[in-house]
Image (cartoon, rainbow, N blue to C red):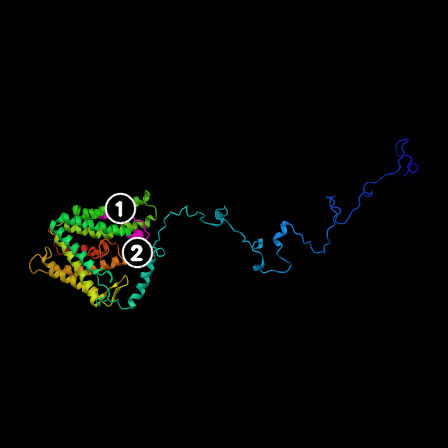
Amino acid sequence: MDEQQNPGVGQPGQVFEEIRILGLETADDSVEPGRSVFDEQLASQDLPHWTEQPAAAETAASAPWSGLDDSPKWADQVPADHESQQPVGMIDKSDAAALFFDDDPAGPGAGGMEFNPPLLPPESPQQPQAAPAVATASRPDAPARRGPNGGGGMGGGGRSDARDMPMAIITGIALGALALIAFKLGTDATLALVTVVLTLGAAEFFLAVRRAGYQPASLLGIVAVAALSLGAYWRFEAAIPLVLGLTVLFSLLWYLTGVDRDAPMLNVSVTMFGVLYIGLLGSYAGLMLSDPNGIGMLLAAVLVTVGYDTGGLLVGKMVGRTPLAAVSPNKTMEGLIGGMGVAFAVAVLVVGRITPMGQAPGDLGSAFVLGVVAALAAPLGDLCESMIKRDLGIKDMGTVLPGHGGFLDRFDSLLFVLPATYYTARLLDLFAA
């Protein structure tokens, strides 16, 4: 537009040659296909058409795909180092994510020393426990094993067909001689021998239950067993509830103060069972020894028990055929009957001549009663100890006595005969005091 067209616009003397409208001017550079408006250096490079195949050259980022083509692939045809073959969601246990996925992220070092005993005697760590259960179920259906001399199984007091009989006989004679010497020396020596035997039996028991996984207050239990024997002799029957009450109290304190911390309810019960089983039953020997005729009563109980064990062993080996009980497959019904018969014969023929059982020549009434009672009590003590050992998954409580096992294995029947003899003497009024 020139001055003639717009004469009134502008300053006087100023001439406009043209007017430009913004947005309608033509760009100086031309637009080329494939060119980036932000990169002038690549203006001369043309992008391939979208229908063309990609170039063969690959960058480092596409290298993992170099072994693949366009066709489908099975999983075993993909390179092992390809990302599609890597496990998804692998979590390191040491990572913080383990705290979310695991209820108890503590490793072996944290809490690994914590003891968690079973409510029942453990079965999985103790493999010997599973074997007796199978033998128990199948043994009654089969005849008892015949021993080398033609006998079937063990009698009431027998332990095993494989026991060393010569060594067992020598050990039995040595124990009998030691007992006779103590009886001859008097009450104090007899009490000392009884206390030592009970204490060693308690030590065997608590060691056996510890091997089975329990954590009893062993030291406290052994002291309580010895205290029951001595207290019954020095303070008679009044000492027994006192010692038992103190044992319960100190057993609870044992776990309360942290001497042992694992399963207090369970382990206090195991501790008290050992004290009652060995200490309480054994304390009747101390009660009998407190009487002037106590040595005669204790000797009568020992002789009847020895008669039961010996008779059951011999008769069971010679004619035993019928298994007696599942808790002790090696014992037979014939051995039980033979042991009871020999125990009764020993009571009548031998014990009837010992004071106070035989107060007068030919007076066999007291010995007869004792023979019947002891013949019933001895097999119960033997079978109960066999039941305990089977529950713990062991054969013998100890190995101190060659051919017999431990003290508790040898005197298990006597633990039941002692209270039977004591109350028989009370019933027959045989106490001098």
- For disc 2, the marked residue is 392
Residue 415 lies in quadrant: bottom left
The quadrant of the rendering that contains the N terminus is top right
Residue 420 screen position, x and y as percent: 18, 56
Magenta stretch holds residue 211: yes
Q: Is residue 397 left or right of residue 428?
A: right
Residue 252 lies in quadrant: top left
- For disc 1, the marked residue is 220
Magenta stretch holds residue 119: no
Q: Residue at coordinates 20% horizontally, 62% vertically from top-left? A: 313
Up/down of 337 relative to 19, above or below: below
Label 2 sits on what residue type? Leu
Q: Nearer the viewer, residue 161 or 81?
A: 81
Residue 370 screen position, x and y as percent: 15, 59
Residue 205 screen position, x and y as percent: 26, 52
Label 1 sits on what residue type? Leu
Q: Say few, some or many: other residues with alpha carbon within 10 Å of mark 2 (under 14 / 14 to 19 / 20 or more).
A: many
Name the dominant secondary structure of the magenta segment.
helix
